[in-house]
Image (cartoon, helix red, strand yellow):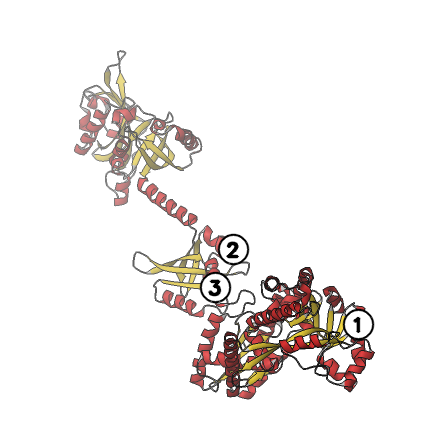
Amino acid sequence: MTDAEPPSRCVFLTDGTGTVQAWNDGCAALFGMTGEQVLGRPIMTLFTPAGRDAWSAGWSALTCRPEGAEVHVDLCACERVLEGTLTLAPQYDADGKSRGCAVAVATGRERGGTEAERVARTPLSAVVDMFPGTFYAINREGRFVLWNHNLERVTELTPDELGATRALDLLDLDARPAVAAAMEQIFTKGEEVKLEVDYVSRSGHDIPMLLCGTRLRCNGGEYLFGVGVDITERRMHEQQLRLRERALHAASNGIVITRLDNDQSLIEYVNPAFERITGYRADEIMGMDPRFMAAPGMDLIERAQLREAIAARVGAKVVLRNLRKDGELFWNDLSITPVQDEHGVVTHYIGVLTDVTATMLRTAHLEHEVNHDALTGLANRNLLWDRLEQALHLAQRHKSLVATVLIDLDNFKMINDTFGHEAGDVVLKVVARRLQASVRDSDTVARMSGDEFVLILANQPSLRFTLRMVERLRQSFAIPVAFNNREIPVGASVGVSLYPHDGGTAAELVRAADLAMYHGKGTGRNDVHFFSADMKSTTEAKHRIELALRDALDKDELFLLYQPRVTFDGNRVAGFEALLRWRHPDQGVLAPARFLAEAEDSGVIVPIGQRVLDQACAFAAQLCSAGFENIPVTVNVSYREYSQPGFLACLADRLTRHRLPPRSLQLDLRIDGLIRNPTLGKELAEQLRTLGVDLSVDGFGAGLCDLGYLQQLAASQVKLASHTVQALTDGGQAVAKSLIDIGHNLNMEVVAEAVETRPQLDFLESHGCDQFQGIWFSEPLAAEAAQRMLEEQQPA
């Protein structure tokens, strides 16, 4: 069928009852009826039954739509049924009363056609109320001319209120300028516009709407046709997403979302914390697999756990190391969780990583502090015992040897006293580095105590292999340690024990190595000694001597003899040197050489020295009472004694207690002990001068001597070492002569000790030696015999 094409516009008039009052040529052509045939007839006769209902609805709508209405009806024209659109325009008289309406008729196709054509001819008014959202038509004045029921529901306005309302009145004041601009753009440019606005309902509620509008021409006019969709649910969902995104952005933990693609997990999202932790910007790593940050060769077990979890589409939690963008290594605690789609298929993974580098380093530092020496960084006693137990366990399984090496630095206290504690710390650090460089990575170097080190040489295949390693250790001590442009010689005594020969437990092996080391100290410095059963016997013997000496003090078995010191001028006694003896209950009277070294090592020398001072002061008081005030008694004092706190105070107390003039007592100190701690030596010399006690320096010529330092001590006399006197018959006259001259140049008297022969005496006298002592003149005497000697030399 074809469109009807009337020759002119079809318009007719009706009165208030719907009776046709005027009929033009267009109507006659369309309906096939002249005016005479139609005028005075009801308009209903021109419509099909369904069209009559549509007309009635349109006619009723005029009461609330003074601007008119539009009705879609089926028309009966020339035995045809046409789909037509009637535009109703109300007519009023001068008093404003309704006089009917003018009807303009526009026709479409004849009734029938394809399904699509029939649906396309459905009147707009018949479907607008079926829209799920709002529908409206707005004229250029911005007023609604057509709408559906959803608009009434959303705005909570009646049809009359909507008809009198401008579209902008439904919006918040802030939104009106943007919407007005959009409407102007639609009307002027005919563009389609979308925007989101909030309707304000009668009750004051804001309803978010997505509006879409465009311009349409209708019967010569232009209108804005638009639809609106309530996006409240979408807004809530977006708000939730924004909150979640803010939470992700604000999280201190790094968050990464990856998409599974075959065997890879490709990055789709990272939060700012992830960027901060890794140093990578999000745009740099999008689409990459996070495994690109893995630290090569590290944490292989943990990475395998991750791969297995992803392959099985399950979660996992590991702690591993990665590399930041700048190459820095960092620890991260990583937790991955799978994400399923609506079908239950895992499509993504969410990874949460926490930078635990500081915690791991702090834990490692605390663990290191617990198990390592703070100064050298070596294993400490705790870790030493643990490593030794492990080495013994492996040795039992593999039938191998374990060597325990105990190293004690020689004269370390003298290094501290001479060069200062800072130098001692440097020596310990250098020795630690050298020891570590001399062993394998599987071996352990530990600092046992102040200057004592223990090495565990594990899994030794043979004794020959151990000997080579120990020799390498010994050679590491041959090089001096540089400190403040000075070289500090470093020696060590080394003791070695072997598992299983010398012990089956850690404690037994360390004890055996300790015995071997002390045996080395007794036989010579900077040497290596392997443990043997004889050493245990020797050590036990030394321990027995220590106990016996303490018992001797309790039983008063220690006593003094007095060696006369004689002038060359007249062989007159100028003083006595107190010499210690031990009246042993089983071995008889013992000389100091038999027990003094053990007393020094064990520390018993300190109470012995106090006993010696008491007896010497008593003898000096005895001489003073007999009228020999100018005959001093000389007492030998070891470094270990005078380095004790309060030594000078005890000495002064004894002088006071025995009512002795200070010059009646003289202290004999060895030069090597004074040089051991120069500062202490100078302070002691000054305090003795203040106290009035003379200082005698023993062992002059026995070793190295700083003459400048000796002069600073300002001692009253020096004693030639005994081996210097003994060497006079073996070509040592020049040395002795030089020493005598040096002593005189330092304004000190020179005393020769251990003079045993006439030639020795004659040489010393001829070269200006001031005094001598020895068996050539007299054996050491008891106190009574010494006093008689003084009385006998008195002039008659």
Across and down, in percent, residue 213 comes to 37, 35
Q: Amino acid at mark 2?
A: Gly
**Residue behind mark 1:** 742
Q: Specify whether 603 is left or right of 210.
A: right
Tell me the CA gap for discs 2 and 3: 24 Å
For mark 3, give the secondary structure.
helix
Q: Amino acid at mark 3?
A: Ala
Q: Is residue 47 visible?
A: yes
Q: Nearer the viewer, mark 2 or mark 1?
A: 1
In percent of the image, x 36 and y 66: which residue is there?
309
Among numbered discs 2 and 1, the one appearing first in the sequence: 2
Q: Specify whether 302 is left or right of 489.
A: left
Q: Residue furthest right?
A: 766
Q: Nearer the viewer, mark 2 or mark 3?
A: 3
Count of marks overlaid on the render: 3
Across and down, in percent, residue 651 comes to 61, 64
Q: Specify whether 571 is left or right of 141.
A: right
Across and down, in percent, residue 265 comes to 42, 61
Among numbered discs 2 and 3, the one appearing first in the sequence: 2
